[in-house]
Image: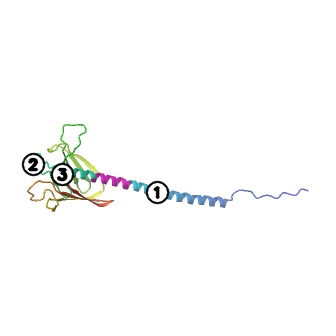
Amino acid sequence: MRTPRPRHPASGYTLIEVLVAVLVFAVLAASAYSALNALSRAAVAHRDHASELAALQLTLTRLAADLRQLSHRSVRDGFGQAGPALNGSITGLQGTRSGWSNPNELRRSQLQRFAWQFDGRELVRLAWPVTDPAPGVAPLTEALDLAVRDLRLAYRDAQGGWHDQWPPRNASDQALPAAIDLRVDTARFGTLRRLLVLE
């Protein structure tokens, strides 16, 4: 009579082992997803921060270039009345700058009438195609996509006094200011200050 062979236990994983493995894999996958998601959000925030900073730096550089190339030439309004070379207030200014590039060699002046204005919501640069704008000549308006909360300008005269407008009240001459103090309050970067020495 033949003796029966002993049965070997079936090889493989039990249901509990499979469930534990799936649970461990799910925890690891969730951890990896959370880490990648946080890294992605940080990269997007860093990109947005760098983009806004570059736009702000470009704007301040353009404004400084306009002011450093101010011309002493007075302007005439639509009625032929002469005005100052620079008209400035606390939240904006208008002047004439030199060095307007002319790569196409058009028949026009190298001087450009420009203005910077802050209306409480956005900072805008205006430029006229002629030096003495007539009433019907519309400026080219460029709204700058910056989160600017406030803009403050102050003007220093040759004697060292500061004024909130230019020309100062009861000024006898039409000279340009010796310096302009520029303060820009932004939502992300706080208040930035530039002191631009003109003379």
- SS at mark 2? strand
Residue 41 in picture, x, y percent from top left:
44, 56
Give residue 163's mark: none
User: Which quadrant is home to the C terminus?
Assistant: bottom left
Q: Which residues lie in the magenta part?
A: 48-60
Residue 166 covered by magenta stretch: no
What's the amino acid at mark 1? Leu
Q: Main secondary structure of the magenta part?
A: helix
CA gap, disc 2 and disc 1: 60 Å
Q: Is residue 147 left or right of residue 47?
A: left
Whether label 3 touches label 2, CB < 8 Å: no
- Residue at figure coordinates x 82%, y 59% from the top left: 6
The residue that mark 1 highlights is 39
- SS at mark 1? helix
Report the residue that reaches farthest toward the front: 199
Q: Nearer the viewer, residue 10 or 60?
A: 60
- SS at mark 3? strand
Residue 81 in picture, x, y percent from top left:
8, 48
User: Which quadrant is home to the N terminus?
Assistant: bottom right
Residue 70 in picture, x, y percent from top left:
18, 50
Q: Nearer the viewer, residue 143 or 74?
A: 74
- Residue at figure coordinates x 22%, y 48% from the top left: 126
The residue that mark 3 highlights is 94
Query: Is tag 2's residue or tag 1's residue first in the polypeptide sequence?
Result: 1
Query: Is tag 3's residue or tag 2's residue first in the polypeptide sequence?
Result: 2
Whether label 2 touches label 1, CB < 8 Å: no
Residue 150 in picture, x, y percent from top left:
25, 59
Whether label 1 touches label 3, CB < 8 Å: no
